[in-house]
Amino acid sequence: MEYKNTDFKKGQPRWCPGCGDHFFLASLHKALAEIGIAPNDTAVISGIGCSSRLPHYMATYGMNTIHGRAAAIATGCKVANPQLEVWQVSGDGDGLAIGGNHFIHANRRNININIILLNNRIYGLTKGQYSPTSPRGFVSKSSPYGTVEDPFRPAELCFGARGHFFARAVATDAAGTVEVLKAAQRHKGTAVCEILQNCVIFNNGTHDSVYTKEGRAKNAIYVEHGKPLIFGENNEFGLIQEGFGLKVVRLGENGITEKDILVHDAHCQDNTLQLKLAMMEGPDFPIALGVIRDVEAPTYDDSVTAQIEEVKNKKPYHSFAELLETNDIWTIE
Amino acid sequence: MTDSMKITNIHDVVVLFAGDSGDGMQLAGNIFSTVSATAGNSISTFPDYPADIRAPQGSLTGVSGFQVHIGAEQVYTPGDKCDVLVAMNAAALKVDYPHAKPDATIIIDTDSFQAADLKKADFKTADYLGEMGIDPDRVIACRLTQMVKDALADSGMDNKAVMKCRNMFALGLVCWLFDRDLSIAFNYLKEKFAKKPEIAEANIKVVQAGYDYGHNTHSSANNVHRIESKHKVPGRYMDITGNKATAYGLIAAAEKAGLKLYLGSYPITPATDILHELSKHKSLGVTTVQCEDEIAGCASAVGASFAGAMAVTSTSGPGICLKSEAMNLAVIMELPLVVIDVQRGGPATGLPTKSEQTDLLQVLFGRNGESPMPVIAATSPTDCFDAAYSACKMALEHMTPVVLMTDAYIANGSGAFRLPELDKYPAIKPPYVPEKLKGSWTPYQRNADGVRYWAVPGREGFEHILGGLEKDDKTGAISTNPENHDLMTRLRQQKIDNIQVPDLEVLGDKDDAELLIVGFGGTYGHLHAAMDELRAEGRKVALAHFKYISPLPKNTADVLTKYNKVVVAEQNMGQFAAYLRMKIDGFVPHQFNEVKGQPFVVEELKEAFRNILA
């Protein structure tokens, strides 16, 4: 069955004009149409926050639930009904602060859901408090003198929780976002997509360096499995491994050619270099976009189903009446 | 049995096995219950174990007990005080002798009453019997440990393994005392240790040794007692704990409804056995997820419910605190969910292994907003089955979360359970949205009972979004319209009020009682026993015991205002009485409240009720 973007579209979004969520929503509609799973077999589950309004603009099944619990709710939904394609949509507060515990455990279990983390580094719906991804020293209504705490970096948390898929896109980059979403859906297991998204009201400019096409050309690297890690407006830079870290080099300088450049391996079980890529930030390094890690592993929902089948074959009882008979029974005449 | 043996028939007896928490008292008690139940006796059990996994050996805090009441006719409680106390060490005697009747038989292992043992148990002198005022003639004092060692001398087992069999000697001795058929105990052990036949054999040998010891030295005890069964409803029976019965009720209901059973849970005493039990039954398709926390347990169940499963989350009071928000999500999304609260002592961590009824107002009112929710309180270990079945049926047919309350006492206690025939249970029919509504259906459209239709994901043409925000009654879109919110609040309340529950029954002197005893949930057995015994004294009393708390039975006010005196007896500071006063204008009952973490004592109830009658 062929689908159009409009088959997934519903209602009129209420986000502020210019909000990154608008861009992302359009990309999600497009990606779902290209993926081609029916709206009635798709569930979009969010928590609470600006971005968590998203399910209301989907013509699929969905829930806009309570703050922080989307991953847990999505987990129950997927385990109970593995036929559903389940998307979780959370912001940085919903997903990593109040919902941090569920985020790490979803990754650890490797439940086959797609987690969209719309990261604008701010609490928007409550009107401008710092979030767990705001940088140290960040000034906000609840930190007028700057925060005195370090932020989470989503990839680090995902990898620390044994996550098997991590990708990053910028909300305004439709093509990049659609690619990442499609890759997340293809991946069997928990797939985390960090979407860099701008809050025009309370944290405008937080992702400025990569928010425009020109900015990305200069300040980002699109990573692709099996391709050398080359970037720059004229593909003049590359990444090489040096010591325990990565290093930016200029092609043609000091005799460096394309064959010296590190080739991206998203399928590598060991996440060391993938983490290094994900942690890169300006001005010394480009910000990595695309699928950074994509490693196959048994999924929780498949394993639950397989175990049930296995035990069904092993155990002689398959109904409540048969279960009763497995007990010590006596008869009163 | 030799000819010289004197066997007396008795009506009922209470045996308390007490020892160190590592002494295997629960196992000995369980086997004795099973043996007695298999013989056709009525049983009621009460395991009382410490919160610590392993308190210091021989210490007073480490004493673990298992009390079983066996009777020729129906027994309602595990009994106030015991007729036989097995004390495996000095600490057990110290802790549990106060729970023995004045004429009780006391069995002790003198090998565990040495100077060091006595010191740990705070005995001041070597004359521990004298110190506690125990008549030595009522004591069967034996070198139990030594006899176990002798019995297993040729087994090749090390000392540690040998010591683990001491409980079996006590079991054998008690089996002798009550003329029990050992073959049932042997079968139990063979099955339990099927993978370790040498352990089974050693245990069996020691049970036999205990029995033989009693037999050969019977002069030291007064009698052998036999409890003949005068049973009750014919049928096939099994022994079942409340937690297991709850799990079985959920399985039965899901099967009846044709739905997958999903449990999202987090381990918590005393509810964990429900998770354990359901986790075993994957061959029935039961899905259990041990979640990262209590919140996820409930939240994942809400997700499973949305996806079309019979969704359940199980916990105790502290877990209910954490689940409240997700329970409320199920209220506003109008999704079926069963929340099991196996109550324990509170507040906070409180008394994890002990029993109370202190969560009542929490489950009724402990959530933000107007949050009506049905509440069912199981009345006995075996009633947990029917209560769980009813909770599922109510949740599915009325599209609402339902709280099933049990408590540590009925959850861990057991009773003889007549095997239910599922085809005789009422059908469960969730209000799936009719196909003909495709195109016009909106998520909060209701059937004639005011119940929202259920559109399970996967169905084409019924895609919809639910959520924690208030929705428009007509369109299902987010709405902050004041009139709509007021309407939705009333519709949610009305839906619960519409639920039909059985009328409240009055037992005992229902027409001319001078005092109506009122209780709810797990105190049924004790209140029933108190009523029976008071009536046997010639006092006019009746009992109205509630299983359905929200909504209340329709005849509640009629029943409770009919009697001159009413006493609400509950294991809290008066929560049910407060609720009833709120529901019934001018209703001012007497109250009997106890919050000790222990089951009611029938004698104390009787005394309190006599005082009210006076």
Image (cartoon, coloured by chain):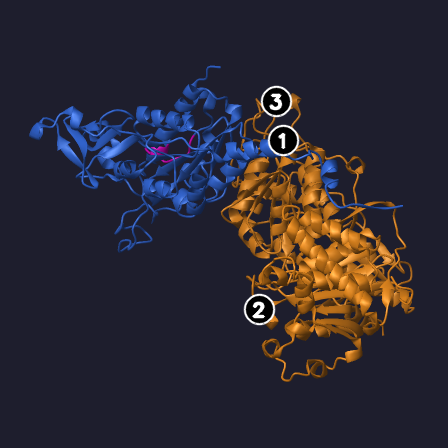
Chain colours: A blue, B orange
Asked if badges 3 and 2 are on one and the same chain, I answer yes
Distance between the alpha carbons at the discs numbered 2 and 1? 44 Å
Give the residue displayed 31% in from the left and 26% down from the top: A176
- Relative to B404, say whether B308 is above or below: above
Residue B47 lies, in percent from the top left, at: 69, 60
**Chain at tag 1:** A
* SS label for mark 1: helix
x 73%, y 55%: residue: B31
Q: Do labels 3 and 1 share a chain?
A: no
- Of all chains, the one bearing label 3 is B
Mark 3 residue element? loop
User: Toward which corner of the image does residue A20 lie, by quadrant?
Assistant: top left
Going by the image, does B369 lie left or right of B108?
Answer: left
User: Which is closer to the viewer, label 3 or label 2?
Assistant: 2
Q: Do the residues labelled 3 and 1 touch (CB within 8 Å)?
A: no
Q: Is residue B131 left or right of residue A70?
A: right
Closer-to-camera residue (A67/B408): B408
Q: Name the residue under label 3.
A: B438
Q: Which mark is residue A228?
A: none
Q: Mark 2 points at which residue?
A: B57
- Amino acid type at circle 2 is Gln
Q: Label 1 amino acid?
A: Asn
The residue where tag 1 is placed is A313
The structure residue drawn at horizontal position 68% and vertical position 81%, both measured from the top left corner, is B128
**Farthest residue in the left direction?**
A254
Disc 3 versus disc 1: distance between alpha carbons?
A: 39 Å
- State whether the magenta stretch is mostly helix, strand or loop: loop
State the separation of the CA atoms marked 3 and 2.
68 Å
